[in-house]
Amino acid sequence: VIDPNPDLTFTGERFRVHYTLSGYGEDDARQVAAFICVEQTIEFPHELVPPGALHDLMVGQVETFTPQGDSRFGVVISYASEAAGMELPQFLNVVFGNVSFTPGVRVERFELPPRLAGAFRGPRFGRQGVHDLMAVYDRPLTCTALKPLGLSAGQMAEMAYRCALGGIDIIKDDHSLSDPPFCPFRERIPRCVEAVARANRQTGYRSLYFPSVGGRMEAFHQKVAFAREAGADGLMIMPAFSGLDTLRMVAEDDAVGLPLIFHPGFLGTYRRSGDFGLSPFVLHGQLSRLMGADITIFPHYHGRFAPPKVECQLALEGTSTPMQHVKANLPAPAGGVRAEHFEEMRDFYGWDAVFLMASNLHRHGPDLVESSRRIRAVAEGLVAGA
Amino acid sequence: VIDPNPDLTFTGERFRVHYTLSGYGEDDARQVAAFICVEQTIEFPHELVPPGALHDLMVGQVETFTPQGDSRFGVVISYASEAAGMELPQFLNVVFGNVSFTPGVRVERFELPPRLAGAFRGPRFGRQGVHDLMAVYDRPLTCTALKPLGLSAGQMAEMAYRCALGGIDIIKDDHSLSDPPFCPFRERIPRCVEAVARANRQTGYRSLYFPSVGGRMEAFHQKVAFAREAGADGLMIMPAFSGLDTLRMVAEDDAVGLPLIFHPGFLGTYRRSGDFGLSPFVLHGQLSRLMGADITIFPHYHGRFAPPKVECQLALEGTSTPMQHVKANLPAPAGGVRAEHFEEMRDFYGWDAVFLMASNLHRHGPDLVESSRRIRAVAEGLVAGA
């Protein structure tokens, strides 16, 4: 019924996606695997596609099918790189578009072959680049967030100044700080930039300021440009709202050229849904790197979200698993981190990480400069080999 | 410790979010409710915020707490409209940003007060507007998708022509059709527009063509403009990739002015994760309308995804639940729909709906014009009161 399309050619390159299917007997799981192969590609009655390239190459292929006990099956499916269209949206669409609605399908990891990987620049700075910016090569970086929502731009700048004076490495806007009338973006960013620069002149440190850029998309690109021109050292973006492909676009834009933080707000269901969704390895690791994020925030196993430790291990591994030329990025465990955790965190995540601590920084005492100094001192006590 | 911000004023207007907390005992559930109030707003140690407006009004407030049995609790939390910043991203951030990482938290619905609702235009056309475009007021609309991925632009146009000749009301690109070299966007759209217009001249019908606009965000706005200038009748957008706020931006753009279809690909984990995420009422209904979608696609309870019937009921209710001036939009159940289901679907969804049938249209037989005529005839047989 379907005639061949002469413009449809295949290089033969295929990428592999590792799924776990849960809650199925073996026969059903094999059917789900076959369903994924068709649904994620031609999404068309396979029997109506005549033999040939379209039938044989565009459709996904089950590479391995491995019972894992307890009604779980590991399935590796390969897809033609052509199906992914050499772009992030269609790549993610093939990996998990429609089957995000199929019960018990979880994406564990993916493998990128060279040609498809070539469609992505990946993190501009990556781990090494961020360390170069800070001139810090032997200890975890410290990070804090400006909050609470409700303060004025001047108050946020004063807070940024004090944190920088105490030596916090990275000072970012809280993700709730969009552009409210009581703390306008165009006032907040230059004031915080100036405050951190002033502190740096006093300390000799190189603290960085990362505003949160988001809000109404009509103004998004203007805000990115404004923040850059105002002297922001980097940007934090929430892909859930601004778009999974928007962070990538900003990361690859040479006119921006700043390091980026991926904030995972609103994306938790991809991760916390047990047998559904994306593994922490994919969400916080591989995907954040395809998007070009240099720093990827995720919940630490101690704290307000307290995911199982193994999930943090997966997130960590995803930040550095080989993906062709795509650089490793920096894991930034967060969400209730305390200074008492730093040593254990260094042992768990390694020194090449960012420890994000906000609420608990304020719990250290009323003097934010002194609290920040103590945090930095703890981090400096964790130098490699110490 | 925190001084008052003189620019922080509150109108007193608050919006309410209905959550279900699952898997908790009552004491823990109350703690989670209190946690949400702080985490979703100031995200700061509450005890360090001095009494006053910030402490009393910015933080969420538990309005009701209702045991529902089986370790489940219904909790209604109100937030100041000011916390939502009069924009979709920050509104969603308050509703479910960080707590998307908290186990057992599900958003069931939200209530929009007038001032906050005023930040949203909602669907430009809505149910009535789409019916006006079609001049069809008494039966479900039929819809199909151009596929499989792999065909050329010419083949897609020929398929669109045949479907329109048979009288399918809405012909859309499959969501996998981004901009592949074998079926380029800038060739596909004008050819499909011409094909559907040619069929309309022959039939006297008003079939509409909705291209899928997505892909790399660098070209997104150019593609929207191109599709509009090429004569597309509407656009389909995938908010997961292009951004939850991007669909809204396109919907509110008078220079575009086209009806929009919300495709939920990659968003399934929000819905299918059981006790986590967003209810179908929110995801497919309320949220799709805040984004300005005129037609909202979701999986029908018969077919390839087969969610529980109650979930389709919730999605349906969300498309028309009162939200101030925000118009109702059209539910478009999909994913394995068959013509034999139409009558039952009319009974379930009402006549004011779009029945999306793609794969099974091709299973009706080799003559796509004839198959499309039969589909239209079935829909025409379902006129209100028939």
Image (tube, coloured by chain):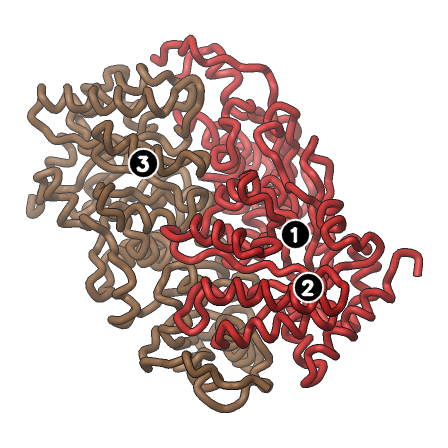
Chain colours: A red, B brown
Residue A220: percent from left, percent from top: 43, 51
Residue at mark 3: B224
Count of numbered labels shown in the rendering:
3
Q: Residue at x 27, y 66 (%)?
A: B117
Tell me the distance, in whole angstroms, between the alpha carbons under discs 2 and 1: 11 Å
- Does residue A312 appear in the picture of this structure? yes
Q: Residues within 10 Å of mark 3 (few under 14, many from 20)?
A: many
Which is nearer the eye, A361 or A264? A361
Q: In which quadrant of the rendered image does the C terminus of chain B lie?
A: top left
**Quarter of the rendering containing residue B90:** bottom left
Viewer-proximal residue, A27 or B296? B296
Do the residues at pointers 1 and 3 share their chain? Answer: no
The amino acid type of the residue labelled 3 equals: Val
Chain label for disc 2: A
Q: Position of residue B168 (x, y in %)?
A: 19, 29
- Name the residue rendered at 10%, 28% in the picture: B205
Q: CA distance from mark 3 to mark 2?
A: 39 Å
Disc number at residue A143? 2
Residue A295's disc is 1
